[in-house]
């Protein structure tokens, strides 16, 4: 993926965060999102989209690895990563169009299920890629891509759980 696409995505993420500052010395509740800030639902949608993009990037990177570097488990990751990208894309579509009203709980549950399944697939692939003995340069690039996708997916799940209460 061209670096300008990644920079644009990072800009969209960074420009959307507004949190209430809390004095670090004073005990009290953790920082909370303010009414002016991006809602947890919007953050969940953005992280799901970022996770989908990262999983797609990892899938492309995996397909570029020389055949002699691919074990059976790693080959299975081609399907798992495409599946993860698709699931996170579905979660994004649902999260981007609903509100946090209780009437949307089944859709939130669906999004959480898809993101959780994607995280399981990403974790499985991360373990498989880390076990690749040969082709260390390919392995390290994939590990970074999978870590990024897992991190975004985990963040999406966190914000979904905040919305669900």
Image (spheres, rainbow, N blue to C red):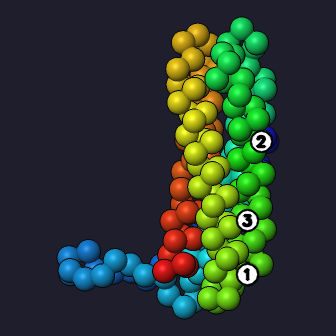
Quadrant in the picture for residue 112 = bottom right
Q: Say which residue label 2 marks.
A: 82
C-alpha separation, residue under disc 1 versus residue under disc 3: 10 Å
**Secondary element type, mark 3:** helix
Residue occupying image coordinates x 78% and y 26%: 63
Whole-percent x, y for residue 93 in the image = 78, 68
**Secondary element type, mark 1:** loop
**Secondary element type, mark 2:** helix
Residue occupying image coordinates x 58% and y 45%: 120
Say if 76 sits above or below 54 in the image. Answer: above
Say if 4 sits above or below 145 in the image. Answer: below
Residue occupying image coordinates x 57% and y 89%: 36
Assess whether mark 3 and mark 2 are in contact (beta carbons under 8 angstroms). Answer: no
Whole-percent x, y for residue 111 in the image = 67, 66
Left or right of 128: which side holds 82?
right
C-alpha separation, residue under disc 2 versus residue under disc 3: 15 Å
Residue occupying image coordinates x 53% and y 56%: 154
Quadrant in the picture for residue 88 = bottom right
Say the numbered circle drawn on residue 98: 1
Say the numbered circle drawn on residue 92: 3
Say if 129 sits above or below 21 in the image. Answer: above
Residue 38 seen in this snapshot:
no
């Amino acid at each position: 993926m061209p670096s300008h696409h990644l920079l644009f995505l990072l800009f969209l993420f960074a420009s959307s965060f507004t949190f209430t500052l809390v004095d670090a010395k004073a005990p009290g509740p953790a920082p909370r999102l303010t009414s002016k800030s991006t809602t947890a639902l919007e953050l969940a949608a953005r992280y799901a989209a970022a996770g989908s993009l990262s999983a797609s990037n990892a899938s492309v990177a995996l397909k570029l690895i020389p055949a002699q570097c691919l074990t059976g488990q790693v080959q299975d990751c081609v399907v798992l990563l495409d599946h993860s990208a698709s699931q996170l894309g579905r979660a994004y579509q649902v999260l981007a169009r609903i509100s946090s009203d209780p009437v949307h709980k089944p859709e939130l549950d669906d999004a959480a299920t898809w993101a959780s399944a994607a995280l399981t697939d990403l974790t499985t692939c991360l373990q498989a890629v880390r076990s690749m003995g040969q082709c260390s340069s390919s392995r390290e690039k994939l590990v970074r891509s999978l870590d990024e996708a897992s991190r975004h997916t985990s963040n999406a799940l966190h914000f979904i759980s905040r919305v669900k209460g």
